[in-house]
Image (cartoon, rainbow, N blue to C red):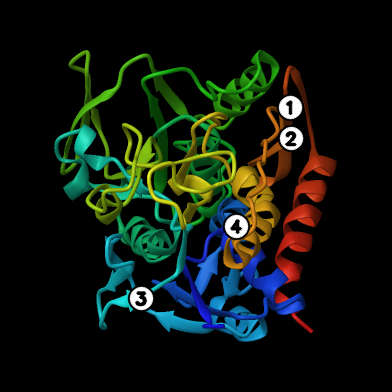
Amino acid sequence: MAMKHLVLVGGGHSHVEVLRRWGLRPEPGARLTLIGRERHTPYSGMLPGFIAGHYSFEQMHIDLAALAQFAGAEFIHDEAIGLDTRRTQLHRRNGSPLSYDLLAIDTGSSPLLATAPGASVHAVAVKPISNFIDRWKKVEARVRAATGTVRIGVVGAGAGGVEILLAIQHAFANMPKAGTASASGQRVEFHLISAGPVLPTHNPGTRRRFERVLAARGVVVHTGHAVAELLANAVRLEDGTSLPLDETLWVTQAGGLPWIAKSGLATDERGFIRVSDTLESISHPGVFASGDVAAVVNHPREKAGVFAVRQGPPLTANLRRALRGEPLQTFTPQKKFLSLISTGDRYAVASRGQWSAEGRLLWTLKDWIDRRFMSRYQNLA
């Protein structure tokens, strides 16, 4: 019987679980390859804590080469740039095409900067997170080197945007409110910009809690108008308002990677791969997708790390079944989930359905959950 080749594209939250389970129980008759743009993949849940200074680089990253070795997989440090589904070949930037029998994609998303003129030039995109780490260091260096008042804007008032803004504020001397002089005498202002309300997918109680926190921290909130254009030192809103900004971070809608849109795979309007309840492409059997890059046709959900994490076990099971030629199993994601949203300091707000709460104990709970998750992939022994 010929050895079948399973290729994993990307080291997202679903794929790291596939690798872990493969290491615990290898699949006979299968050869596994992981292709990743970076050797160390970040855990999105710890990004705000990393920016705020609560976690080190090592604490928030998974070593994909070590995890692949544990799984008995070949790790290729390269980037996928194209897909030929007819020849079942994956094209990569720095090597010859990679042939596969089964393909799984968990690459995350890319920012939709084309929605606002100037965004691709002047905005600092948070996604993909692996690229943002270096961008953040440059932003931090520019701000700390500046004299006088520095104005920082975050476009996108979802949980990601709010957490990133408050983490950045905490990183710059933990100021009680924007406009207060830091230890170096520098003044930093913070602006949150969104076409919709703050935390639009969360319950009213959670929104009120964060509106209070943002007001107490002196964050200037601009809601109700989308960004029309980004300039070198300003953001122009749809209503004509111009906001002077020295740094603009883009934490709003994202889409699929450009090479996926050109692959012939069925995608939605934002370029995400349309998959069935089995996480297999609705147009191309043998191609699977999970995490942010996947759009589960029968169960649309917001893009949140919890769904990628929960897809890991059913994805592993169906990849095994596909390799064996067995029927695939369906998976239904939960509709409600617990969100623990940090406020920059060691404090968090909990949100689930119509319930909300806040406190330092909730940050301790979030910290424990995140560290426990990471320990699965960092302590492989």
Q: Hey, what amino acid is under mark 3? A: Ser
Q: Hey, what amino acid is under mark 2? A: Leu
> Which element is circle 3 on?
strand
Quadrant in the rendering for residue 99: bottom left
Specify whether 281 is left or right of 70: left
Residue appearing at x 64%, y 58% in the figure = 326
Residue indicated by mark 1: 352
| Residue 66 position in % (x across, y down) | 60, 84
Residue indicated by mark 4: 14
- Residue 371 visible in the displayed image: yes
Q: Earlier in the sequence, mark 1 or mark 4?
A: 4
Q: For the N terminus, which image quadrant? A: bottom right
Residue indicated by mark 3: 99
Q: Label 1, label 2: how many angstroms apart (C-alpha)?
A: 5 Å
Q: Label 2, label 3: how many angstroms apart (C-alpha)?
A: 40 Å
Which callout, 1 or 4, points to the residue nearer the camera? 4
Residue appearing at x 42%, y 82% in the figure = 76
Q: Label 1, label 3: how many angstroms apart (C-alpha)?
A: 43 Å
Q: Earlier in the sequence, mark 1 or mark 3?
A: 3
Q: Label 1, label 4: how many angstroms apart (C-alpha)?
A: 23 Å
State if disc 4 and disc 1 touch (CB < 8 Å): no
Residue indicated by mark 2: 338
Q: Earlier in the sequence, mark 3 or mark 4?
A: 4
Quadrant in the rendering for residue 196: top left
> Which element is circle 4 on?
helix
Residue appearing at x 34%, y 77% in the figure = 98
| Residue 226 position in % (x across, y down) | 29, 22
Q: Hey, what amino acid is under mark 4? A: Ser
Few, some or many C-alpha atoms within 10 Å of disc 2 (few <14, some 14-19, many ≥20)?
Answer: few
